[in-house]
Image: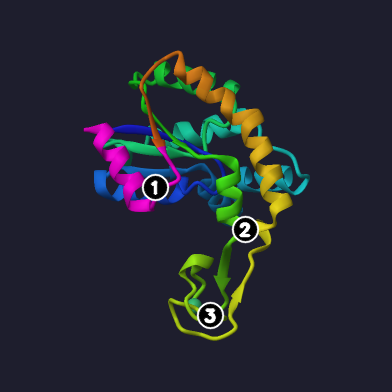
Amino acid sequence: MKLVIFGAPGVGKGTQAKILSEKLKIVHISTGDILRQAIKQDSETGRNIKNIIDKGQLVPDEIMIEIVKEAITSENCSNGYILDGFPRTVNQAVMLDRLFISTGQSMPIIIDIAADDEVLISRLTSRRTCNSCKNIISLSDIIENNVCPVCKAVNTLEKRKDDDEEVIRKRLKVFHETTAPVMEYYSKKGNIIKVNGIQPIEKVNADILAELH
Ligand SMILES: [Zn+2]
């Protein structure tokens, strides 16, 4: 089974991709993870990518599509994969289509995890990270003040830097400007599963699996 997963930052896209890859026994291809891995390995490609990101620029589509090509045509993807983090632009979606044609692969099923911006913002700004156990905790799960509900450490809960409202609004704006048109592009081709992302993780996952079967 071949899947591509979409969703706004904070909607739990990566979490769903991970669960789906385990349940369906397919490979989770996270382009973000692949980029971080490439940088870590300090290969020539890795150094190129690091230079680009350090300058605050986006990794060019040509490099991204090469990374995706290598991943989806690799042996371990013979049972299928779930692509997470790509395509982010219509141009990348067009390149991906060409890649499917040139490698003789069928079009994947597109999963769109939908969520209202304001709900996402309130959800993200009410998250804390525990400095002790490193878990991400939702404010609604904190029963005793200043006590981590997972490891019971006291005064270890901190607001994440990424979770400032202004930063979140900026990321959502970029998402709507660049990635939302990708959904429009795919809507003309069909094969889209749309689920409500404002539900517990298990329910979102069950909804996706129900649509796939
Ligand atoms: Zn903790």
Q: Residue furthest left?
A: 213
- Cα distance, mark 3 to mark 2? 20 Å
Within 8 Å of ligand 1, the CB of disc 3? yes
Examine the residues drawn in magenta and state their main secondary structure: helix
Alpha-carbon neighbours of circle 3 within 10 Å: few (<14), some, or many (≥20)?
some
Asked which quadrant contains residue 29, the reply is top left
- Tag shown at residue 132: 3
Alpha-carbon neighbours of circle 1 within 10 Å: few (<14), some, or many (≥20)?
some
For the record, the magenta segment spans 196-213
Alpha-carbon neighbours of circle 2 within 10 Å: few (<14), some, or many (≥20)?
some
- Cα distance, mark 3 to mark 1? 25 Å
**What secondary structure is marked by label 2?**
helix
* Image quarter of the N terminus: top left
Q: Position of residue 39 (x, y in %)?
A: 61, 52
Q: Residue furthest bottom?
A: 154
Q: Amino acid at mark 3?
A: Ser
* Image quarter of the C terminus: top left
**Can you tell which of label 3 and label 2 is closer to the viewer?**
2
- Tag shown at residue 125: 2
